[in-house]
C-alpha cells in the first residue's frame, strides 16, 4: 500500500516533527457523528489561521489525554474505499470546495486512514456545522481545538485571503526542472517517509505540495526552491544565506575569520551549527566534596541551535537582500535576521518567564520542513528553551531586540563569564608576549566590565598594572573587585596586589591586605598567600595560611620548606622568653620544622632546594640541642650540593 504522506506515520502518531495541536485522532468511523466533526476540522486545517500548513486527522486510532493508544483499533479494510469516497464527496460541501490528501496506512497490522488537510491556496473556507447542518461557518484551529471563527478572529481570517505566505507562492518564472530530485530524495529519507516507494518524481512533488499547475504548466513553490536547489540565491532569493563573522575584539575590531553558508536552508543551518559547535569551549570541574562534576560551555549548544534555526525560519525571503548574520565577539554572539517579528509580538513577550502568544507565522512551509527534520521546536517553545538553557549553563540571560519599525530582529547570547575571562587572559598574554603591555591592560579592563566578579581577570589586570608601576590604580581595581557580589578566586586577587606592593617596597600595605584576606578556598592559593605574607614579614599570618592550605603543603617541596622556615622564625621570636609555655611552644615549633625539612629531603626536588633544606635542618638541630655531629653532617650535605654558597661554610665553622 503506497503512502501519500511526506511524514513517517510513526513520527506522526508520536508527534515527532509535528505538533500535537496539528493532529486529531478519531477512534472509529460513524457517518452520522464522525463525518460532521471531521468536516469542521478539515475546514479549520484548510483555513490554516496560524500558517502552520494545516494538520492531520487520524481515523482508526483512539487517544487518551492527547496521546495515541497503540496498537490502533483500526478500520475494517472493506470500508476504507467507501469512507474515502464519503469524505471526498462531502468536502465538496465546503465553500469553496477543497480536497485533502487521503492516505490509508497499516500500523501494527491494522488499517487506519490519515487525512492530511494541508493549508489551502483558496482560503477562507466555510463548512456546515455538524450540530446544526443547515448553518454554515468559518472554522479555525485554536490550539488543539476546532472553533468557529468569530469576532476579530473571523475578520483576520477573511483578510488572510489576500495574504498568501511568500514561501507557498508559485515561482512562475521557474519550472519543475529547476528542482533537484536528489535533494528531495535525501529529505524524504531523513524524515523516513514512504513517498519514495513506487512514485515517480512528478507524483512525489505533487504529494509534497511542492508544485502546482498554473497557465497550463506546473511551477514550483518558493519553498521548493529554498529547500531543493543547490543555491536559493541563484534562484532570486537574495539574502538566503548565513554569514558568520568572528571578531578578535568588539565591533570594529579585526576579523579572525569569515564564513558564508549557502545551499538549501536545512543544509545552511546544519553546516553553520557544525562550524559554530567546533568553536565552543567547555570546561568540567571536579569537586572533592561531592561526586557530581560541574561545568560550563562558552555558549550552550541548545540555545545556539534554537536561535539560529529561528532566525532562518522566521525571516523573510521576499526581496530581502540582507543575509542572516552571526557575529562572534569575545564576550557574546549576536544573531540578526530581517525583518522583525510578526505583528502581535512585543519586546515584553521576549522576557524571561513571559508567555509567547500565538500569531500567524511568516513562513508556512519552511517551519513544517524544519520541524519534520527535527531542526525546529514546536510553536512558542523556542524562546523559553533559550532562556532555560542559558540559565542551566550559568550564562547571563539572552537579549532580544527589534526596532519600532520591525526592520530587524536581533538576539544576543552573552558568553559564559568564565569563558569571557579565559578569552581575555589569552588575548592579554598574547599582547604581553608581543610587548604590548598597554594593549593587554586595555583588553583586561574591557573584560572586567563584562565579568566584574572574575578573580582571574582582576588578578591579571592588577599584575599588569603593577608591572607598569601603577600600583595605586591596581589598588582601585582591587577595591572595586572586593565590592562585587559573587566574586570568585578572591585569593588570587589578594596575592596579585600584595605582590605588587612588595615589589614596590611597600610591605606594610602588603601585610595589611594579607592580614584581612579571607581563608583561601584552594590549597595552592593559600600557599601563595603564605609565601607573600613571609615576604611582608608577617610570619604569624603566613603560618595560619599554611595551615589553611592543608595537606597540599606536605606534597609540595617548596611549600613544605617555606612552612618549615616559618616555624623556625616563629621559634626564634620566642627564643628570649623565659615563660615555660613559650619554651614549650618554641620546642614544638622546632620539632615540627625538623619533620617538614626531613620530608623535603625525601621528595624529588632540585639540588638547590635540598641544599637549603640541609642548611636549615642543621640550624634547627642546633637550636634543639641535638648532638653537634648531626648538625655538622647536615651543613656538610648542604656544602656538597652547593659548594659555592659561602653561608653554608660560615655556619659550619660556628661553634
Image: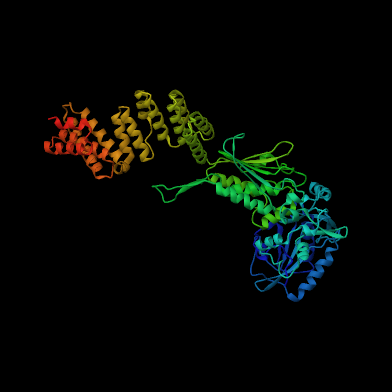
Q: Residue 51 placed where, x, y %?
A: 75, 52
Task: Identify which residue is drawn at 81% across, 70% down.
Answer: 85
> Dividing the image into 4 quarters, which one contains the C terminus?
top left
Residue 36 sits above or below residue 482 on the image? below
State the image coordinates of residue 148 (x, y, percent, origin top left).
79, 54
Indicate whether 154 appears above or below 449: below
Q: Is residue 579 visible?
A: yes
Q: Tell me: residue 41, above or below residue 257.
A: below
Residue furthest right in the image:
215
Please state the horizontal and vertical placement of residue 471, each as a whole percent of the image. 43, 24
Whether residue 627 is visible to the viewer of this picture, yes or no, is no
- Left or right of 291? Residue 554 is left
Q: Residue at x 33, y 38 (%)?
A: 548
Give the left or right position of residue 626, taking residue 20 as reference. Answer: left
Q: Nearer the viewer, residue 611 or 205?
A: 611
Quadrant of the snapshot with the N terminus = bottom right
Task: Classify residue 227 as left or right of residue 330.
Answer: right
Residue toward you, 239 or 498: 239
- The image quadrant of residue 34 is bottom right
Query: Which of the two residues, 4 or 345, is positioned nearer the viewer here?
Result: 4
Question: Closest to the observer: 652 or 425?
Answer: 652
Colour convention of the picture? rainbow
Which of the 4 image quarters holds residue 395? top right
Residue 260 locus on image (x, y percent): 65, 46
**Residue farthest along the bottom direction in this orientation:** 78
Q: Residue at x 47, y 33 (%)?
A: 432
State the residue lying farthest toward the front.
644
Amino acid at each position: 500500500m503506497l503512502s501519500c504522506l511526506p511524514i513517517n506515520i510513526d513520527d506522526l502518531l508520536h508527534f515527532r516533527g509535528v505538533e500535537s495541536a496539528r493532529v486529531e485522532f478519531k477512534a472509529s468511523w460513524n457517518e452520522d457523528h464522525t463525518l460532521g466533526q471531521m468536516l469542521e476540522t478539515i475546514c479549520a486545517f484548510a483555513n490554516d489561521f496560524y500558517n502552520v500548513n494545516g494538520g492531520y486527522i487520524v481515523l482508526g486510532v483512539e487517544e487518551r489525554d492527547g496521546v495515541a493508544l497503540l496498537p490502533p483499533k483500526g478500520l475494517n479494510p472493506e470500508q476504507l474505499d467507501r469512507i474515502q469516497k464519503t469524505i471526498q464527496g462531502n468536502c465538496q460541501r465546503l465553500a469553496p470546495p477543497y480536497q485533502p490528501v487521503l492516505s490509508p496506512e497499516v500500523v501494527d497490522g491494522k488499517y487506519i486512514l490519515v487525512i492530511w488537510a494541508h493549508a489551502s491556496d483558496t482560503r477562507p473556507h466555510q463548512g456546515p456545522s455538524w450540530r446544526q447542518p443547515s448553518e454554515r461557518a468559518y472554522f479555525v484551529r485554536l490550539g488543539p481545538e476546532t472553533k468557529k471563527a468569530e469576532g476579530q478572529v473571523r475578520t483576520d481570517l477573511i483578510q488572510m485571503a489576500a495574504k498568501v505566505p511568500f514561501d507557498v507562492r508559485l515561482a512562475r518564472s521557474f519550472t519543475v526542472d529547476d528542482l533537484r530530485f536528489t535533494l528531495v530524495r535525501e529529505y524524504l529519507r531523513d524524515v523516513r517517509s514512504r513517498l519514495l516507494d513506487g512514485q515517480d518524481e512528478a507524483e512525489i512533488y505533487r504529494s509534497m505540495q511542492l508544485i502546482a499547475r498554473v497557465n497550463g504548466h506546473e511551477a514550483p513553490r518558493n519553498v521548493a526552491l529554498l529547500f531543493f536547489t543547490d543555491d536559493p540565491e541563484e534562484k532570486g532569493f537574495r539574502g538566503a544565506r548565513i554569514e558568520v563573522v568572528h571578531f578578535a575584539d568588539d565591533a570594529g575590531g579585526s576579523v579572525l575569520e569569515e564564513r558564508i553558508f549557502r545551499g538549501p536552508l536545512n543544509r545552511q543551518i546544519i553546516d553553520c551549527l557544525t562550524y559554530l559547535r567546533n568553536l565552543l569551549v567547555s570546561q568540567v570541574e571536579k569537586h572533592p566534596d561531592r561526586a557530581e562534576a560541574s561545568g560550563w560551555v562558552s555558549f550552550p549548544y541548545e540555545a545556539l541551535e534554537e536561535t539560529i534555526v529561528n532566525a532562518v525560519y522566521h525571516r523573510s525571503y521576499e526581496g530581502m537582500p540582507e543575509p542572516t548574520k552571526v557575529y562572534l565577539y569575545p564576550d557574546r554572539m549576536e544573531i540578526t535576521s530581517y525583518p522583525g517579528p510578526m505583528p502581535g509580538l512585543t519586546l515584553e513577550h521576549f522576557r524571561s518567564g513571559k508567555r509567547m502568544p500565538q500569531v500567524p507565522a511568516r513562513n508556512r512551509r519552511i517551519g513544517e520542513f524544519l520541524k519534520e527534520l527535527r531542526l525546529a521546536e514546536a510553536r512558542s517553545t523556542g524562546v523559553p528553551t533559550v532562556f532555560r538553557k542559558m540559565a542551566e549553563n550559568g550564562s547571563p540571560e539572552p537579549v532580544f531586540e527589534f526596532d519600532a519599525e520591525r526592520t530587524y530582529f536581533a538576539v544576543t547570547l552573552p558568553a559564559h563569564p568564565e569563558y569571557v575571562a579565559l578569552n581575555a587572559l589569552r588575548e592579554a598574554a598574547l599582547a604581553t608576549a608581543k610587548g604590548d603591555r598597554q594593549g593587554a591592560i586595555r583588553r583586561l579592563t574591557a573584560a572586567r566590565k563584562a565579568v566584574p566578579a572574575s578573580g582571574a581577570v582582576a588578578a591579571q589586570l592588577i599584575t599588569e598594572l603593577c608591572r607598569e608601576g601603577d600600583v595605586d590604580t591596581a589598588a582601585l581595581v582591587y577595591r572595586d573587585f572586593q565590592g562585587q557580589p559573587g566574586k570568585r578566586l578572591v585569593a588570587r586577587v589578594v596575592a596579585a596586589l600584595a605582590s605588587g606592593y612588595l615589589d614596590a617596597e611597600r610591605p606594610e600595605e602588603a601585610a595589611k591586605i594579607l592580614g584581612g584576606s579571607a581563608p583561601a578556598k584552594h590549597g595552592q592559593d593559600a600557599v601563595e598567600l603564605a609565601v607573600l605574607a613571609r615576604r611582608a614579614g608577617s610570619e604569624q599570618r603566613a603560618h595560619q595560611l599554611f595551615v589553611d592550605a592543608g595537606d597540599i603543603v606536605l606534597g609540595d617541596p617548596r611549600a613544605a620548606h617555606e612552612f618549615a622556615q616559618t616555624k623556625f622564625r616563629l621559634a626564634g621570636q620566642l627564643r628570649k622568653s623565659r615563660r615555660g609555655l613559650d619554651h614549650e611552644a618554641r620546642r614544638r615549633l622546632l620539632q615540627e620544622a625538623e619533620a617538614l625539612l626531613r620530608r623535603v629531603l625525601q621528595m624529588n626536588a632540585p639540588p638547590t632546594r635540598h641544599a637549603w633544606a640541609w642548611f636549615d635542618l642543621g640550624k634547627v638541630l642546633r637550636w634543639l640541642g641535638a648532638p653537634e655531629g648531626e648538625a655538622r653532617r647536615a651543613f656538610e650535605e648542604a656544602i656538597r650540593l652547593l659548594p659555592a654558597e659561602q653561608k653554608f661554610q660560615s655556619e659550619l665553622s660556628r661553634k
